Image: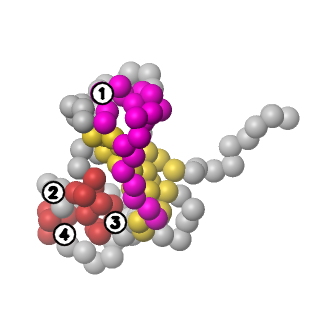
């Protein structure tokens, strides 16, 4: 018997370069529900997040409708953004996938929030 067991997913965190633009995508286009949003500017934030040059961290927590799963969007303030582009062979990188259902929104909706094209995939 194990001492601890994972019972399910809680949330996923995504670092973004523009929180307002990301909310336009995740909330307004994909339909996630905004639970809360806060800008943290306390001096200890640098130590907590491990980014000494950060002057603030703005976080928006969204919930996937009909579930307890949340998506945490994080925008670091006061530091140069660094893209997350790296080889998937590097230890510590991760992937994620989600299931979703189209709601009749057109490809144009994706273009309004800066996506080059709408996602494609197989249907079940």
Cα distance between the residues tagged 4 and 3 = 13 Å
Cα distance between the residues tagged 3 and 1 = 29 Å
Apparent side of residue 2 relative to residue 48 in the rendered image (left or right): right
Of the two numbered discs 1 and 2 on the same chain, state the one appearing first in sequence. Answer: 1
Nearer the observer, disc 4 or disc 3?
3
Neighbour class for label 2 at 10 Å: few (<14), some, many (≥20)?
Answer: few
Q: Which residue is mark 2?
A: 114
Of the two numbered discs 4 and 3 on the same chain, state the one appearing first in sequence. Answer: 3
Position in image of residue 97 (x %, y %)? 42, 49
Apparent side of residue 18 relative to residue 13 in the rendered image (left or right): left
Position in image of residue 34 (x %, y %)? 41, 65
User: Please, which residue is most extreme toward the top here?
Assistant: 90
Cα distance between the residues tagged 2 and 4 = 9 Å
Of the two numbered discs 3 and 1 on the same chain, state the one appearing first in sequence. Answer: 3
Indicate the secondary structure of the residue bearing disc 2: loop
Q: Which residue range is magenta in the image? A: 35-55
User: Please, which residue is most extreme toward the bottom here?
Assistant: 104
Q: Which residue is mark 4?
A: 109
Of the two numbered discs 1 and 4 on the same chain, state the one appearing first in sequence. Answer: 1
Nearer the observer, disc 2 or disc 3?
3
Position in image of residue 31 (x %, y %)? 36, 69
Nearer the observer, disc 3 or disc 1?
1
Q: Which residue is mark 3?
A: 27
Taking depth in this image into account, of 115 and 76 the one nearest to the observer is 76
User: Please, which residue is most extreme toward the front here?
Assistant: 43
Of the two numbered discs 2 and 4 on the same chain, state the one appearing first in sequence. Answer: 4
Q: Which residue is mark 1?
A: 53
Total numbered badges shown on the rendered structure: 4
């Amino acid at each position: 018997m194990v001492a601890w067991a994972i019972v399910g997913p809680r949330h996923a965190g995504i670092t973004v370069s523009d929180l307002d633009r990301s909310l336009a995508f995740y909330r307004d286009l994909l339909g996630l529900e905004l639970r809360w949003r806060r800008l943290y500017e306390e001096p200890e934030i640098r130590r907590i997040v491990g980014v000494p040059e950060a002057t603030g961290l703005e976080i928006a927590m969204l919930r996937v409708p009909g579930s307890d799963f949340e998506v945490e969007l994080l925008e670091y303030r006061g530091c140069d953004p660094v893209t997350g582009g790296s080889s998937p062979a590097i230890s510590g990188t991760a992937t994620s996938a989600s299931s979703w259902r189209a709601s009749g929104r057109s490809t144009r909706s994706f273009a309004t929030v800066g996506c080059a094209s709408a996602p494609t995939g197989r249907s079940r």
